[in-house]
Image (cartoon, coloured by chain):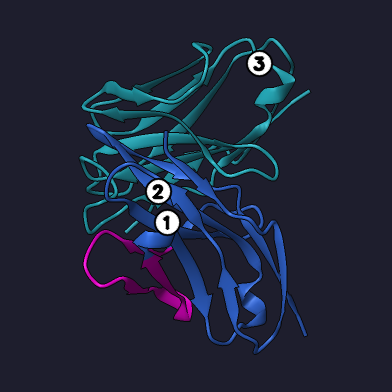
Chain colours: A blue, B cyan
């Protein structure tokens, strides 16, 4: 069965510091991987996605993620965090059974300190 | 161009009641998926509709049912509500067969259901 693990429930980063959010997945085939961000009371906004090709993926808001097949990881990074980045971040894998569904991790809450 | 629209935004129901949530997909999208997000959890897949048929279903009881209309909009119905059904219900639209197209998934802001 497909699964996604986000080992960090909360992370606090100082504004201007770099950020890395961890994501490990379990999937039997080539994964389709996504990172979403959710602000309080809001829906999910797609930051970036990986389907194939270059393992370093660029997204919106200055985020990037690197797919490492050998480690079954898809970690999200940002070189310099802004206070507006404080939110909940979800990693997801697209699972195929004829149609595609998303399997999400439990999320990492990012807090940004001044 | 409107994204995914969900209604209502908030809802309070009593245990045992029935509820209907509505979703209008993004223009051009033909597939609608529903997710349940309990507090402090990631979204869990409920089911997916395409061409007015349920195409796949997650691990949810039959109390959860849905419908897709010819205009691609969708409803999620939950019968015999339990306290544990309290959650944010998210609708996501996409273009067949799923989010691997360049358009990906578009999520609505959700309906917050509270069961008391």
**Nearer the observer, disc 3 or disc 1?**
1
**Nearer the observer, disc 1 or disc 2?**
1
Q: Is residue A66 found inside the magenta-colored segment of the image?
A: yes
Circle 2 Cα neighbour tier, 10 Å, few/some/many (<14 / 14–19 / ≥20) = many
| Residue matched to label 1 | A72
The tag on residue B106 is none
Nearest to N terminus: mark 1 or mark 2: 1
Q: Residue at x 70, y 41 (%)?
A: B39
Q: Secondary structure at mark 1?
A: loop
- In the rendered image, is residue B107 in sight? no
User: Residue A78: x and y, percent?
Assistant: 52, 80
Q: Chain of mark 2?
A: A
Position of A108 with respect to A22 (left or right) is right
Residue B52: quarter of image: top left
Q: Nearer the viewer, residue A98 or A41?
A: A98
Q: Quadrant of the N terminus of chain A?
A: top left
| Residue matched to label 2 | A93
Q: Is residue A104 above or below residue A37?
A: above
Q: Residue at x 63, y 55 (%)?
A: A7
| Residue matched to label 3 | B81
């Amino acid at each position: 069965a497909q699964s996604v693990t986000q080992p960090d429930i909360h992370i606090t980063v100082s504004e201007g510091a770099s950020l890395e959010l961890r994501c490990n997945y379990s999937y039997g085939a080539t994964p389709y991987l996504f990172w979403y961000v959710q602000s309080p009371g809001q829906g999910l906004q797609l930051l970036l996605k990986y389907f194939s090709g270059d393992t370093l993926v660029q997204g919106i808001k200055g985020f990037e993620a690197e797919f490492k097949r050998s480690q079954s990881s898809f970690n999200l990074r940002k070189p310099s965090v802004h206070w507006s980045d404080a939110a909940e971040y979800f990693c997801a894998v697209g699972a195929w059974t004829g149609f595609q569904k998303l399997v999400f991790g439990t999320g990492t809450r990012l807090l940004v300190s001044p | 161009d409107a994204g995914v629209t969900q209604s209502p935004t908030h809802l309070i129901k009593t245990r045992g009641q029935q509820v209907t949530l509505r979703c209008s997909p993004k223009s051009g999208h033909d597939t609608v998926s529903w997710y349940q997000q309990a507090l402090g959890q990631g979204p869990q897949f409920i089911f997916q509709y395409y061409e007015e048929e349920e195409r796949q279903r997650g691990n949810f009881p039959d109390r959860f049912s849905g419908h897709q209309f010819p205009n691609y909009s969708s409803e999620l119905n939950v019968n015999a509500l339990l306290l544990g059904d309290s959650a944010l219900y998210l609708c996501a639209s996409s273009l067949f067969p799923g989010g691997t197209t360049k358009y990906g998934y578009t999520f609505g802001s959700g309906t917050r259901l509270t069961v008391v």
